[in-house]
């Protein structure tokens, strides 16, 4: 997550692009991420960078 003061300055895009570069260099075949639906700007960024939504469910079992 990018600090509110730095939003709109391509910080999120730069961080994500660097993570993708590192993943490619390491031989990764894909990169998955999760983002909550209400994070509209982040979700739009990921789609602009080429991420595509997947149908999936995330389950959590609370222990505390």
Image: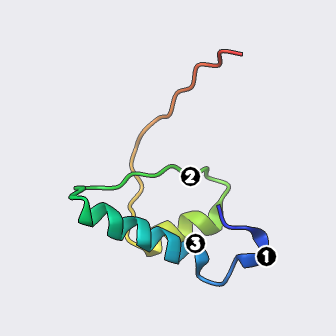
Instruction: Looking at the picture, tell me which residue is in the foreground, 13 or 56.
Output: 13
Q: Residue 14: image x %, image y %?
A: 51, 77
Horizontal placement of 7 versus 21: left or right? Answer: right
Q: Earlier in the sequence, mark 2 or mark 3?
A: 3
Horizontal placement of 44 versus 17: left or right? Answer: right
Is label 2 in a helix, a strand or a loop? loop
Quadrant holding the N terminus: bottom right
Q: Earlier in the sequence, mark 1 or mark 3?
A: 1
- Give the residue number, with chain letter if any, for mark 3: 12
Q: How far apart are marks 2 and 3 (CA)?
A: 13 Å
Q: Residue shown at 56%/52% (left/top)? A: 35
| Label disc, if present, on residue 5 of the rendered structure | 1
Foreground: disc 2 or disc 1: 1
Q: Residue 39: image x %, image y %?
A: 65, 59
Count of marks overlaid on the render: 3
Marks 3 and 2: in contact by CB < 8 Å? no
Quadrant holding the C terminus: top right
Q: Residue shown at 55%/63% (left/top)? A: 43
> Residue lying furthest top in this view?
63
Q: Residue shown at 67%/55% (left/top)? A: 38
| Label disc, if present, on residue 35 of the rendered structure | 2
Say few, some or many: other residues with alpha carbon within 10 Å of mark 3 (under 14 / 14 to 19 / 20 or more).
some
Q: Which of marks 2 and 1 is nearer the N terminus?
A: 1
> Residue lying furthest right in this view?
5
Is label 1 in a helix, a strand or a loop? helix
Model colouring: rainbow
Q: Residue shown at 39%/49% (left/top)? A: 54
Q: Distance between the residues labelled 1 and 3?
A: 12 Å
Residue 49 in which image quadrant: bottom left
Q: Distance between the residues labelled 2 and 1?
A: 20 Å
């Amino acid at each position: 997550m990018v600090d509110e003061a730095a939003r709109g300055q391509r910080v999120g895009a730069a961080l994500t692009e660097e993570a993708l570069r590192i993943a490619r260099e390491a031989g990764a075949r894909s990169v998955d991420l999760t983002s909550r639906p209400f994070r509209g700007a982040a979700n739009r960024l990921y789609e602009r960078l080429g991420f595509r939504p997947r149908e999936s469910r995330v389950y959590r079992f609370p222990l505390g």
